[in-house]
Image (tube, rainbow, N blue to C red):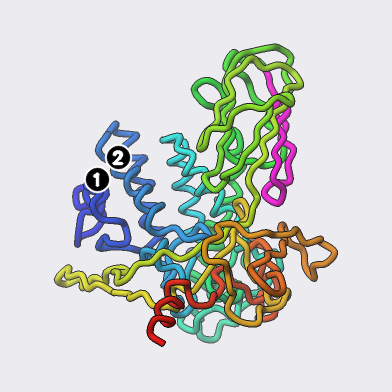
């Protein structure tokens, strides 16, 4: 605690002061930083330190604002914090970005912050990472990664045993394949191998069910809309079951049925995701007003009561954030503790991009569905585009969600949820979530003025 975790600068004081963002700190290795502040929070709770509690919470909010990408991971240039919220359309050298360790440690930090602050934005962030960066890294094809082990990790004379790791390590954003590179590859004496992402990835699936239904001060809080049943006790100690029926996030509707032997008054709060602009909620068929963020249903509940929540599943167009000239991060010269900034300048290549989101699912283009003829031509001002669901029978591979998006004139764009994309682990299913677009409206205006 005394030296603030690093010799070249007190990270904890920097977080408490809240003037810099984590990518500007003198140490930026992404998931280690998140773990470090998880530790600071536990220390604060154990000692009752309001100062260090505030520092950990401020760190998490800063991270959310400056480093989390559309996939819900961080670190696009490597495994380091690099202001990725605005730099995520910059081509990542070597492709070793969006590390699974980063995604899952961010999920851990969000879960902790959700329980501590009750802020539904941390529930939004957990869900964003779960459905996009995290589920996408599951090596469901049991693809052997041995060929990805770097030469420096190999032990001379020891043959590598063919096997597969449960999680991939890196996820492309601008175009690429899954399963490239193994974070922290380690060869074991019997020739088998392992890696950091494969090791801690399972924390994500372990955490998710715990955030479905939480106990709150006056009742319960539903944070994730996972199908299944929760058997628990009401504030008065009576047994109750919340049965959740849904195909969310493919579908837009979540139905919650209560089973309880007695009547009782308590509150059930529902997280209304920040991306959901149009919502509809009913209790036993009667409309109930929706409050953005958290909607509180405080009433006298009884057996058979049914809550139906419908969320906004329009396809939204997302654009890069302009950044001009910006510091990505700082390289530290350890002998002198001098910080050498790495600067990035915005150009047309960064800005001529668009991504598409449907509910919590980021959509991707997968080579198996054909590539567009060229850069997309999008309407200048539309935040949402018309889209038709694609029937499973029309797809050459399984997907949680598939749509045909009408981007303007011409053939509709065929997109799938990004976690379903890339599942041959080869070039035949290369995929991208940030797609190239033509010149922006302001660019065409300039060139017309010059000609
Ligand atoms: Zn890793």
Residue 196 in view, yes or no: no
Q: Secondary structure at mark 1?
A: helix
Residue 47 is situated, as x and y percent measured from the top left of the image, at 29, 33
The verdict on residue 277 being magenta is no
- Callout 2 environment at 10 Å: few (<14), some (14 to 19), or many (20+)? some
Position of residue 424 relative to residue 307, above or below, is below
**In this figure, which residue is indicated by the disc labeled 1?**
16
**In this figure, which residue is indicated by the disc labeled 2?**
54
Position of residue 88 relative to residue 244, above or below, is below
178 horizontally vs 151: left or right: right
Residue 442 in view, yes or no: yes
Task: Identify the mark nearer the N-term, 2 or 1.
Answer: 1
Residue 171 is situated, as x and y percent measured from the top left of the image, at 55, 68
Quarter of the picture holding the C terminus: bottom left
Q: Say which of 293 and 429 sits in front.
A: 293
Q: Which residues are magenta?
A: 239-258
Q: Is label 2 in contact with label 1 (beta carbons under 8 Å)?
A: yes
Query: What residue is drawn where x is 68% and y is 65%?
Result: 406
Residue 208 is situated, as x and y percent measured from the top left of the image, at 59, 45
């Amino acid at each position: 605690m005394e030296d603030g975790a690093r010799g070249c600068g007190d990270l904890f004081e920097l977080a408490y002061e809240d003037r810099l963002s984590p990518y500007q700190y003198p140490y930026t290795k992404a998931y280690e930083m998140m773990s470090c502040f998880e530790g600071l929070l536990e220390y604060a709770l154990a000692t009752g330190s309001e100062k260090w509690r505030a520092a950990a919470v401020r760190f998490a909010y800063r991270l959310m604002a400056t480093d989390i990408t559309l996939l819900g991971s961080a670190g696009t240039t490597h495994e380091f914090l690099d202001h990725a919220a605005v730099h995520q359309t910059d081509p990542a050298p070597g492709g070793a970005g969006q590390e699974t360790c980063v995604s899952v440690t961010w999920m851990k930090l969000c879960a902790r912050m959700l329980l501590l602050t009750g802020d539904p934005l941390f529930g939004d962030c957990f869900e964003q990472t779960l459905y996009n960066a995290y589920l996408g890294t599951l090596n469901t094809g049991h693809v052997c990664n041995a060929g990805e082990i770097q030469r420096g990790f190999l032990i001379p004379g020891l043959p590598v045993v063919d096997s597969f790791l449960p999680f991939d390590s890196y996820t492309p954003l601008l175009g690429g394949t899954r399963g490239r590179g193994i974070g922290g590859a380690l060869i074991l004496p019997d020739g088998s191998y392992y890696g950091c992402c494969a090791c801690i990835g399972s924390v994500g699936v372990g955490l998710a069910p715990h955030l479905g239904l939480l106990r709150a001060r006056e009742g319960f809080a539903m944070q994730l809309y996972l199908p299944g049943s929760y058997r628990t006790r009401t504030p008065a100690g009576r047994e109750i079951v919340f049965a959740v029926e849904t195909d969310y996030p493919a579908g837009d509707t979540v139905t919650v049925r209560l089973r309880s032997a007695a009547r009782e008054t308590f509150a059930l709060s529902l997280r209304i995701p920040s991306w959901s602009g149009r919502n509809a909620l009913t209790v036993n068929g009667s409309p109930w007003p929706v409050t953005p963020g958290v909607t509180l249903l405080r009433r006298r509940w009884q057996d058979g009561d049914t809550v139906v929540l419908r969320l906004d599943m329009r396809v939204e167009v997302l654009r890069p954030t302009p950044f001009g000239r910006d510091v990505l991060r700082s390289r530290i010269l350890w002998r002198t503790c001098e910080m050498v900034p790495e600067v990035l300048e915005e150009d047309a290549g960064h800005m001529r991009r668009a991504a598409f989101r449907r509910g919590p699912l980021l959509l991707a283009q997968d080579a198996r569905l054909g590539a567009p003829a060229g850069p997309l031509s999008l309407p200048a001002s539309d935040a949402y585009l018309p889209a038709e669901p694609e029937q499973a029978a029309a797809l050459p591979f399984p997907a949680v969600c598939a749509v045909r998006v009408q981007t303007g004139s011409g053939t509709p764009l065929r997109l799938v949820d990004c976690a379903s994309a890339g599942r041959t682990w080869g070039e035949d299913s290369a995929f991208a979530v940030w797609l190239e677009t033509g010149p922006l409206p302001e660019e065409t205006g300039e060139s017309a003025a010059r000609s």
